[in-house]
Amino acid sequence: SAVGPGDVVTFRDTTREGELVTHRVVQVTREANRVSFVTRGDANTGEERWSIDSRGTIGATAFRVPGAGHLLAWLRMPHVRATFLISSALVIAALALRRIWSG
């Protein structure tokens, strides 16, 4: 009942085998024991229509981290991921060697 148009929610999409989907609410319709939603992703024009029991729960945005999506997309690139993993392994190895040589 606290969710309205413009809010960003996360729900299980039954058309995608229960995959979690995060989209913006376009329309909310409250009926007897159900709440129906129309949602749309910010980067597409397709709409999802789904409903839940009026006592059901969905995830709503608690806070926003500007740019986090761009950072995560950048980290998913294969060459960035490989560089990050190799750099992390080198730092861990250097710390381990330092500990061995100093003790």
Image: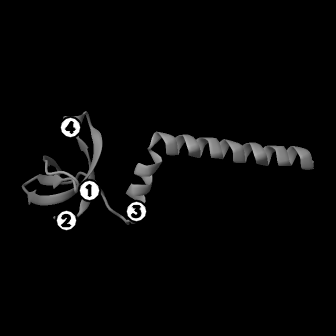
Q: Using the numbered discs, state the Cα–Cα distance from disc 3 to disc 1 in whole angstroms.
A: 18 Å
- The Cα atoms of the two marked residues, 3 and 4, are separated by 29 Å
> Can you identify the residue that label 4 sits on?
14
Mark 2: secondary structure: loop
Q: Which residue is mark 1?
A: 9
Q: Decide which of 2, 19 is in the foreground and name it.
A: 19
- Camera-near label (4 vs 2) is 2
Please rate how many residues cluster around mark 4, counting C-alpha atoms within 10 Å: few if below 14, some from 14 to 19, many from 20: few
Q: Earlier in the sequence, mark 3 or mark 1?
A: 1
Q: Residue at label 2?
A: 6
Which amino acid is tagged 2?
Gly
Residue identified by numbered label 3: 67
Expressed as whole percent of the image width and height from the top left, the position of residue 86 reads 63, 41
Q: Position of residue 52 (x, y in %)?
A: 17, 48
Tell me the crowding category of disc 2: few under 14, some 14 to 19, or many 20 or more residues within 10 angstroms, Cα based. Answer: few
| Marks 4,1: beta carbons within 8 A | no
Q: CA distance from mark 2 to mark 1?
A: 9 Å
Residue positioned 44% across, 50% down in the render: 74
Q: Are marks 2 and 3 in contact (CB under 8 Å)?
A: no
Residue 54 percent coordinates (x, y): 17, 54
Q: Residue at x 41, y 65 (%)?
A: 65
Residue 15, above or below 87 = above
Inter-mark Cα distance, 2 to 3: 19 Å
Label 1 residue SS: strand
**What amino acid type should be assigned to the residue bearing mark 1?**
Val
- Dot 3 falls on a residue whose secondary structure is loop
